[in-house]
């Protein structure tokens, strides 16, 4: 909170006290700025030099770089990191809240229009990388509103600030040096090198290290321009997915109906089996269409993000490739659903999201620890219900003669001992 905002919230007497304290705050920032300039030369420069950056390029890049005090999660020198919010105060939301129908409809309509506008580029991308155009468009739409979202932050300011004073200084230092390599490559001028508050750049939202590895010059002008060139943006997204293992000719997955006599505790990439075997258990597509013949012998995985309380899926390895872009089941489902709307005039998932997601994270954490104590593999005990936690809950329910729901609820907390 800025001093001005504090003033507006204080009474007159407190306001006067705050006014007398303001110079100390300014002096503190002044000293921090001076420490930052010293850090650039004494700490960052040796690492940049070791990474192959020339002194002239280094000095030019940082001539006008400044600390961005408005960024979140900063830890100025001499202070400690802010304590994490107590898990007892944090709820995890219903998965259904992620899928705003209004937003998905708007993105899909724009995506279908852009699919026509950029049809030739998308055909060339699919031929080159094997990634379907609707998937590429869906990621473009989700990450930057098809390039229409404001990308406000100078990347070097963000990365330098976070490298100097954040809890993940090493990560941001590496990304900062990668950004210097991008500037030396001539792909972008520093003034045009803009990104998010976390340092993700341009329309595909690539971190600098990802840019160096995956960005492509798809329009052939000699520069990898993910800020202004639509072919470069789309080609770079597709190249990323291709390098992460996208399987040409396969879908991302299918919404399905899982019969009650088929256990929901079979979720996860480590329990993959051919889609034909899943179908033989009675699992069917909710659309009533048959699974593609080409998928019958190919591996697929069960996915129940809300257990028995929400839509159910069989997904392909390509689903997990999408998760390489953002490691979230809900993100990958959002992209898959949006791509289906763009390419196949698909609609919302037919399964309804139940009344879930109201439990405190501390309650889920308690269940995780109890399962872990009994030998179940719940993944990370973090108060969030990932697939290993969901699967373990379902296994515990079955073992104890209960109908498996594969999702945490208040009743489970009381019975799980």
Image: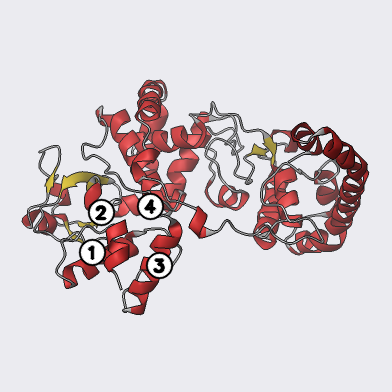
The one of 66 and 217 positioned closer to us in this rendering: 66
Secondary element at tag 2: helix
Q: Give the class, few, some or many, for how many residues have Cα within 10 Å of label 2's Cα (few <14, many ≥20).
A: many
Residue 309 seen in the current view? yes
Please identify, in this view, whether the residue under mark 3 or under mark 4 is nearer the observer: 3
On residue 307, the disc is 2
Please identify, in this view, whether the residue under mark 3 or under mark 1 is nearer the observer: 3
Whether the residues at callouts 2 and 1 have beta carbons within 8 Å, the answer is yes
Name the N-terminal-most of marks 3 and 1. 3
Taking the spot 35% from the left edge, 45% from the top edge, the residue there is 95
Tell me the residue that label 3 is attached to: 366
Spatial CA span between label 2 and label 3: 19 Å
Secondary element at tag 4: helix
Spatial CA span between label 3 and label 1: 16 Å
Tell me the residue that label 1 is attached to: 394
Please identify, in this view, whether the residue under mark 2 or under mark 4 is nearer the observer: 2
On residue 321, the disc is 4
Spatial CA span between label 2 and label 4: 22 Å
Spatial CA span between label 4 and label 1: 26 Å
The answer to whether residue 390 is left or right of residue 118 is left
Q: Quadrant of residue 384?
A: bottom left
């Amino acid at each position: 909170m800025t001093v001005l905002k504090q003033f507006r919230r204080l009474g007159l007497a407190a306001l006067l006290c705050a006014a007398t304290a303001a110079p100390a705050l300014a002096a503190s920032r002044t000293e921090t700025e001076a420490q930052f300039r010293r850090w650039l030369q004494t700490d960052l420069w040796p690492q940049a030099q070791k990474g192959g950056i020339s002194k002239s390029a280094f000095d030019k890049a940082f001539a006008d770089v400044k600390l961005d005090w408005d960024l979140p999660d900063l830890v100025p020198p001499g202070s400690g990191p802010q304590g994490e919010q107590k898990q007892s105060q944090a709820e995890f939301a219903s998965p259904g809240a992620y899928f705003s129908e209004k937003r998905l409809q708007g993105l899909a309509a724009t995506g279908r229009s852009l699919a026509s506008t950029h049809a030739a580029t998308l055909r060339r991308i699919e031929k080159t990388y094997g990634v379907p155009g609707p998937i590429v468009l869906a990621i473009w739409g989700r990450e930057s509103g098809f390039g229409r979202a404001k990308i406000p932050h100078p990347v070097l300011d963000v990365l330098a600030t976070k490298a100097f004073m954040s809890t993940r200084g090493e990560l941001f230092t590496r990304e900062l040096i990668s950004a210097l390599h991008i500037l030396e490559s001539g792909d972008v001028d520093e003034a045009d090198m803009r990104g998010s508050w976390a340092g993700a750049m341009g329309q595909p939202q690539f971190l600098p290290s990802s840019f160096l590895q995956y960005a492509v010059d798809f329009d052939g002008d000699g520069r990898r321009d993910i800020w202004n060139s639509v072919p470069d943006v789309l080609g770079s997204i597709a190249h990323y997915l291709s390098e992460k293992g996208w399987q040409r000719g396969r879908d991302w997955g299918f919404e399905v109906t899982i019969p009650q006599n088929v256990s929901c505790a079979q979720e996860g990439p480590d329990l993959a089996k051919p889609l034909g075997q899943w179908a033989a258990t009675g699992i069917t597509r909710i659309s009533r269409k048959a699974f593609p013949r080409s998928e019958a012998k190919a591996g697929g995985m069960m996915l129940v993000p809300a257990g028995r309380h929400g839509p159910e899926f069989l997904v392909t390895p390509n689903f997990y490739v999408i998760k390489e872009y953002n490691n979230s089941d809900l993100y990958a489902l959002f992209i898959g659903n949006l791509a289906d709307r763009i390419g196949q005039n698909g609609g919302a998932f037919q399964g309804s999201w139940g009344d879930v997601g109201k439990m405190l994270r501390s309650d889920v954490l308690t269940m995780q620890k109890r399962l872990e104590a009994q030998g179940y593999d719940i993944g990370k005990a973090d108060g969030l219900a990932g697939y290993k936690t969901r699967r373990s809950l379902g296994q515990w329910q079955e073992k104890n003669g209960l109908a498996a729901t594969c999702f945490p609820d208040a009743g489970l907390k009381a019975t799980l001992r």
